[in-house]
Amino acid sequence: MNGTSVTEFILIGFPSPREVEIVLFMLFFIILVVAMIGNSIIITLICTDNRLQSPMYFFLCNLSLIEILMTMSVVPKMLENFLSERKTISFYGCLAQSYFYFLLGISEYVLLAMMSYDRYVAICYPLSYSTIMNGKVCVWLVVGSWMGGFFSILVPTVIKLGLPYCGPNIINHFFCDSAPLLHLACADIQLLEFIDFIISLPVLLGSLLLTVISYMYIICTIIRIPSAKGRQKAFSTCTSHFTMVTIGYGTSIFIYVRPSQASSMNLNKVAALMTTAVTPMLNPLIFSLRNQKVKEALRDSITKCQCFLFKAVRCVV
C-alpha cells in the first residue's frame, strides 16, 4: 500500500436536501426491517417444518441467508450516512464492504444456477430426483457456491488493497462499489478493470447460461405433460425462482458486465439498490406468496404462536 495517504472515503450516495434524506432514511429502514424479518421467517420455517425438508427449500434457506448478509453489508451504512453530516467510511471498512458485497453477490448467482438445476432434475427426472439431488450433493452445491464467491473476489480485493490511494477520496456511490473505488487509485487501473470484467463475465453469464438451458429443458418437458392441471403445477414450482433470476441477472448484467463502468454512475446506483435492498425484501414475498407449502407452514406457525400466547395470557390471568 505504498503511497497511500487516504484513511477514509466519502460516500456521496444520493445528494438531497435534509428533509428528503430523512424520508429516504425512513423508507430504507422499513425496507431493511421487512427484508430481515421476511428472510428470517423463511429460514426459521424451513429449519423447523418437516414439510419443507427438500433440496428446493434447502437452497431457498441459503438464498435467504445470503440476502440477509447482503443487506446488512450495505444498507446500515447507507442509513447512517442519511443522518450524518460527514458521510464517511474508513479505508479498511470500505474494502471489507466491497469484498463481502461481491462475495455474497457471486455466491447468490451461483446458487440461483444450482436452484435452476434442481428444478430441471425435479421436473425432467422426477423418478430419479431423490437419488440425484441427495443430501450430500445439495450440501456440496451450496458449499461450492460460497467457495466460488470467496475465491473469485479474493485476488481482485488483494490487488485493490495494494493500490496507492493518495486522493481524492470521494466515491460517487452509496457503498464501496468496485468501479468508483478503482477510479480513486493513483495508478493505472486498466488491468484491474479488465480482471473485474473477466471475473464477472463467466460468473454472471455462465450461471445465466446454465439457468437458461435448464429452463429450456423444463419448458419442453412441461409442454409434453398431457393434463392442464399437471402443467400448471409444474410451472408453479418454477415461477418464483424465475422471477428472482430475472430481477437479479437483469440488474447485475446492466451494472457489471461492461468493460468500463465509469459512465452512467447514477443509473448504476439506482440499479444497485435492486440487489442490495429491494430484491432481499422481495425474496420472501415472492417465494411465500407463490408457494403453497410455505404458506401452509406459515399459517400453522402463526396458529401455534397464537395458541401459545393465549395459554400464556390465561396462565398470567
Image (tube, rainbow, N blue to C red):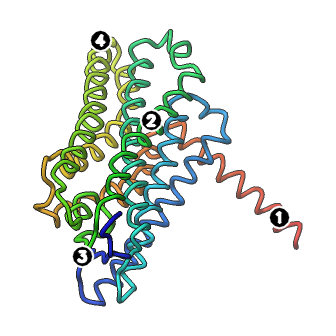
Task: Give the residue at mark 1.
Answer: 312
Q: Is mark 2 in CB contact (under 8 Å) with mark 3?
A: no
Residue at screen point 29% across, 17% down: 217
Task: Give the residue at mark 2.
Answer: 145
Q: Position of residue 129 (x, y in %)?
A: 50, 15
Q: What element carries label 1?
A: helix
Q: Is mark 3 in CB contact (under 8 Å) with mark 1?
A: no
Q: Earlier in the sequence, mark 3 or mark 4?
A: 3
Q: Residue 304 carries which label?
A: none
Task: Give the residue at mark 4.
Answer: 224
Query: Which numbered disc, 2 or 1, marks the residue closer to the eye?
Result: 2
Identity, as a three-letter code, of the amino acid under mark 4: Arg
Task: Give the residue at mark 3.
Answer: 167
Give the CA distance from mark 3 to mark 4: 62 Å
Q: Quadrant of the N terminus?
A: bottom left
Q: Where is residue 288 in the image (x, y as percent from the top left)?
A: 48, 45
Foreground residue among 181 and 50:
181
Q: Quadrant of residue 52?
A: top right
Give the CA distance from mark 3 to mark 1: 61 Å
Q: Where is residue 135 in the image (x, y as percent from the top left)?
A: 60, 23
Identity, as a three-letter code, of the amino acid under mark 1: Ala
CA neighbours of label 4 inside 10 A, class few (<14), some (14 to 19), many (20+)? few
Identity, as a three-letter code, of the amino acid under mark 3: Gly
Query: Which numbered disc, 3 or 1, marks the residue closer to the eye?
Result: 3
Q: Is mark 1 in CB contact (under 8 Å) with mark 4?
A: no
Q: Which of marks 2 and 4 is nearer the N terminus?
A: 2
Residue at screen point 25% across, 21% down: 216
Q: What element carries label 3?
A: loop
Farthest residue, direction front: 2
Q: Is mark 2 in CB contact (under 8 Å) with mark 1?
A: no
- Residue 304 appears left or right of 143: right
CA neighbours of label 3 inside 10 A, class few (<14), some (14 to 19), many (20+)? some
